[in-house]
Image (cartoon, rainbow, N blue to C red):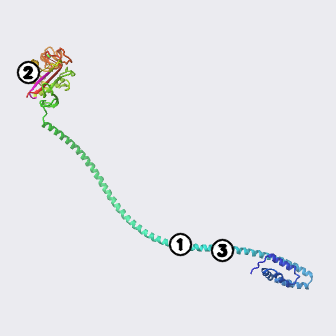
Amino acid sequence: MKCLCNSTLLIAFILALNGAFEASASNETEFCSASQPIDQQCGKYAYNILKPLLTYLKYLQTKVNDNNIVTLIKTNEHLNEELTSLKNTLKEKNELLDAYRSNIADLRESNSNLRIILKSSTSNAQLDSSTTKSLSNELTKLQAQTATDVKNIEIFLKNHISNSEKCEMERRNETEVVTKLEACAQELIIKSNKINELQGQINKLQDQITNDAKKATTEQIPKANSCKALAGGEHEIQVPGLKPFEVLCSGDHPVGKGWIIIQQRINGQEDFERNWNSYRDGFGYFWGDFFLGLTKIHHITHSQRYELYIYMEKFNTEWFAARYDNFRVGSEADLFELQTLGNYTWTNIANDKMRYQEHMKFTTFDRDNDKWMYGNCAKDAKSGGWWYNNCATCNLNGKYFQTAIDDGHSAHWLGWRSLKKIQMLIRPLN
Ligand SMILES: [Ca+2]
């Protein structure tokens, strides 16, 4: 059992003991027993330590009693020195003891901490063990799952490789198909171009067929060669020797319909002072003054027998008409000779004034075919182209005046000069 007394008590005890040196050694027990149980223990402990010293002191006491005081004093001094040394030793041991106590306390605290740590570590170890076990199980499962997945992936890859090979094969087949399709496309383009070319030829043939059909139809249905069966107005007729041409047919007219109007003076807007070619080819407009043309008149009157009807109207609204039943004009080679007139009939007039011009060539200011040896009737005596003889008893192509005027250049029928309206009409006789 450890002594809990402090060093001070021990030193005091030693000093008291030193002071009571002279006292009997039997009083030592009383000194310690006066304290508490701890002090008793301490005293016992100190006594056991100091017992040899006390024994020695008792020996010295006996010795002192036997020796002289000087020796005792020296001995006492020596003992005091030893006591001081012992005090120092005791102090050192106490300090060492305190250090031990501190170390023990530290060790206890460390031990406690170590226990806590150990407990925690044990818990953690248990937890880690459980976790490890769980993880191990999980790992096992994962390994199994991984193995399964690996197998599945292997199967997938195998299938994928197989499919890839199939795809590659299909791709090659598609490439071949594409190549074939491209070749087909090229062939189609060539054929399409050929088709277009053939279509163009077909279109041309169809146009030709259409034109031929029209031509055949036209040929099958002969055009009218006169206005005899036609209504009034413009119509295309055809006569031998000429291409079809437009004529103006009479309609609501005093002489009736079915006549070809070959000459018309109704407003004076057309100049009749024209040259040979103009009279040969014709001029003017059907809605106004016009001359159909000597060539057409020639061919018409040579296609069959024609009668001529001359309608004349004065500014005073009087009108009269001359009619010949065999009107025929020669060709240009004949200088458009007025070859025949036929029999004469009339309306409102009895004078046959065209007869004087029968068998005459046609004369214009640039072509003198008249019988007048001193000049050109069209240029020097009259106006306009006409079948002049030694000039004329009538000239329906003379100058047009807008009023009645006694002028030898006017369009006239002998003494009836400056006519307001003139029409020369022809019609097949039968
Ligand atoms: Ca002449």
- Decide: few, some or many residues near mark 1? Use Cα within 10 Å; few <14, some 14-19, many ≥20: some
Magenta stretch bounds: 303-311
* Vertical placement of residue 296 versus 127, above or below: above
Q: How far apart are marks 2 and 1 (CA)?
A: 150 Å
* Sequence-first disc among 2 and 1: 1
What type is the residue that disc 1 sits on? Thr
The residue furthest left is 343
Q: Is residue 310 visible?
A: yes
Q: On the image, numbered disc 2 is attached to which residue?
A: 344
Who's the residue at 52% across and 73% down the image?
A: 133
Q: In which quarter of the image is residue 414?
A: top left
Q: On the image, numbered disc 1 is attached to which residue?
A: 132
Q: Is residue 82 visible?
A: no
Q: Where is residue 58 in the image (x, y as percent from the top left)?
A: 86, 84
Query: Relative to the observer, which residue lies in front, 308 or 67?
Result: 308
Q: On the image, numbered disc 3 is attached to which residue?
A: 112
Quadrant that contains the N terminus = bottom right
Pair 1/3: label in front:
3
Q: How far apart are marks 1 and 3 (CA)?
A: 29 Å
Query: Relative to the observer, which residue lies in front, 302 or 20?
Result: 20
Q: Position of residue 123 (x, y in %)?
A: 58, 73
